[in-house]
Image (cartoon, coloured by chain):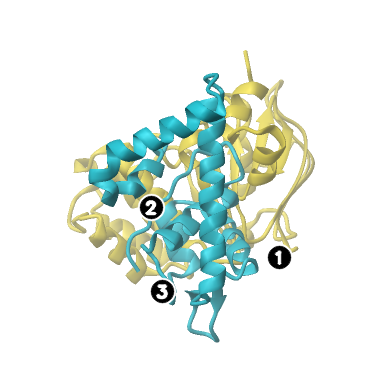
């Protein structure tokens, strides 16, 4: 399993932030359908978090059906396309909501927001391969 | 999970007329990494020394796995002091042998493997190592025991951020599931992500004990932020 990117700032419950990071890795395809998830200890050491906290994040994803335990061989990303598509939509919707909220806080109205997003998309059209980067926030030290 | 590893009941400790621990009641369960957080002089080191059996309570009691600290509980407790107790003339291998002789639960192979990963030469004399490297050697020795209670007094104080990461990984990947790690520090932002729970200690008393994520949820801030609020001067 490739090295994962963790985004932790500490102000909201860590298990939620860890679950968010894992969802993004799954949705982006960094850890795609059927991919084996490393052990709790390995993931915890990688993210430098407590194993119990990581366990709780994995439990959330398992409850959502995004990952599943197969016998004794470990946890795997689901291959259920419906669940993956639904999760992807939910996560992206919530990112879009954040973006709208941020633009609204500058006093932008609905029309201006649509225009800004369309313009930005056009500007970035050449480099869409980097789309994942646009969602990354710097990990706070 | 409900087994209690460390318990204090009505614990008092004075140095002469100076009270340091003033009526502490606390219970730490098995399987947790717990932060002992407080400003300088709040009693962190004293509490740890009481748990390690190096100090005796003025009144009240402190129990490790249900018994007062004695030779038997010392075999269950792996203690990293604030200052080194290893002599400078020792080679790294001497220190490893020392731990091997003293502690039946010491895993020599594990210690040597970790030292190799960090590029620490077993033939080096301790006095020739940098402060940070010396701290790493000691932490490796302490974490290579299969103890029930790890008492780490300021384990990251003197090391650079990269070494801090290694030390935190060492703690996460080495503590046994039925054991508890108590880490004292004032560098909260560096370690808060590894904590299950934390204790805020002030003037020798427990000011707050909470699971870390519960506090983040309740107060909407990091443990570091919460600490700054609670201890605002």
- Please name the color used to draw chain A: cyan
- Residue that carries the numbered disc 2 in the rendered image: A5
Judge left or right: residue B73 versus residue B105: right
Do dots 3 and 2 share one subunit? yes
User: Which of the two marks, 1 or 2, is nearer to us in this view?
Assistant: 2
Q: Which chain is yellow?
A: B
Estimate the spatial distance between the alpha carbons at disc 3 and disc 2, rounded to whole Å.
16 Å
Q: Residue at x 58, y 25 (%)?
A: B39
Q: Secondary structure at mark 1?
A: loop
Q: Secondary structure at mark 3?
A: loop
Q: Secondary structure at mark 2?
A: loop
Estimate the spatial distance between the alpha carbons at disc 3 and disc 1, rounded to whole Å.
31 Å
Residue B35, percent across and down? 59, 42
Of residues B156 and A11, the one drawn nearer to the viewer in this rendering: A11
Of residues B203 and A10, the one drawn nearer to the viewer in this rendering: A10
Q: Residue at x 63, y 26 (%)?
A: B42
Image vertical order of residue B166 relative to residue A55, above or below = above
- What chain is tagged by disc 3? A
Q: Residue at x 35, y 35 (%)?
A: A120
Can you tell which mark lies on residue B36?
none
- Residue that carries the numbered disc 3 in the rendered image: A35
Do dots 3 and 1 share one subunit? no
**N-term-proximal mark, 3 vs 2:** 2
- What chain is tagged by disc 1? B
Can you tell which mark lies on residue B1?
1
Residue A17, percent across and down? 54, 48
Of residues B24 and A111, the one drawn nearer to the viewer in this rendering: A111
Residue B129, percent across and down? 22, 43
What is the quadrant of the N terminus of chain B in the image? bottom right
Judge left or right: residue B33 versus residue B1: left
Estimate the spatial distance between the alpha carbons at disc 1 and disc 2, rounded to whole Å.
31 Å
């Amino acid at each position: 399993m490739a090295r994962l990117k963790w985004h932790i700032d500490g102000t909201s419950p860590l298990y939620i932030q860890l679950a968010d990071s894992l969802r993004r890795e799954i949705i982006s395809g960094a850890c795609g359908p059927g991919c084996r998830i490393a052990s709790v200890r390995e993931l915890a050491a990688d993210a430098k978090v407590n194993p119990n906290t990581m366990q709780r994040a994995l439990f959330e994803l398992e409850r959502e059906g995004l990952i599943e335990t197969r016998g004794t061989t470990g946890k795997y990303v689901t291959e259920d396309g419906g669940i993956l598509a639904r999760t992807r939509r939910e996560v992206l919707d919530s990112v879009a909501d954040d973006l709208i909220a941020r633009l609204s806080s500058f006093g932008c109205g609905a029309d201006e927001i649509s225009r800004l997003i369309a313009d930005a998309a056009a500007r970035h059209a050449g480099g869409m391969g980097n789309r994942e980067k646009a969602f990354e926030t710097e990990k706070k030290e | 999970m409900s087994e209690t590893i460390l318990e204090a009941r009505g614990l008092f400790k004075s140095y002469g007329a100076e009270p340091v621990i003033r009526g502490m009641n606390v219970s730490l369960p098995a399987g947790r990494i717990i932060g002992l957080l407080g400003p300088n002089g709040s009693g962190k080191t004293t509490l740890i020394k009481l748990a390690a059996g190096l100090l005796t309570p003025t009144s009240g009691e402190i129990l490790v796995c249900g018994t007062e600290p004695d030779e038997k509980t010392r075999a269950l407790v792996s203690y990293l002091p604030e200052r080194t107790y290893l002599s400078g003339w020792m080679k790294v291998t001497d220190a490893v042998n020392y731990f091997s002789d003293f502690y039946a639960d010491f895993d020599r192979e594990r210690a040597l493997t970790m030292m190799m990963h960090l590029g620490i030469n077993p033939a080096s004399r301790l006095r020739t190592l940098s402060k940070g490297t010396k701290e790493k050697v000691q932490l490796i020795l302490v974490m290579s025991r299969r103890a029930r209670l790890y008492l780490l007094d300021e384990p990251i104080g003197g090391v650079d951020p990269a070494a801090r990461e290694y030390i935190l990984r060492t703690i996460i990947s080495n503590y046994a599931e039925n054991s508890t790690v108590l880490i004292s520090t004032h560098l909260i932002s560096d370690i808060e992500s590894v904590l299950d729970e934390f204790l805020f200690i002030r003037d020798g008393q427990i000011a707050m004990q909470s699971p870390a994520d519960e506090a983040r949820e309740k107060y909407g801030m990091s443990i570091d932020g919460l600490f700054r609020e609670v201890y605002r001067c």
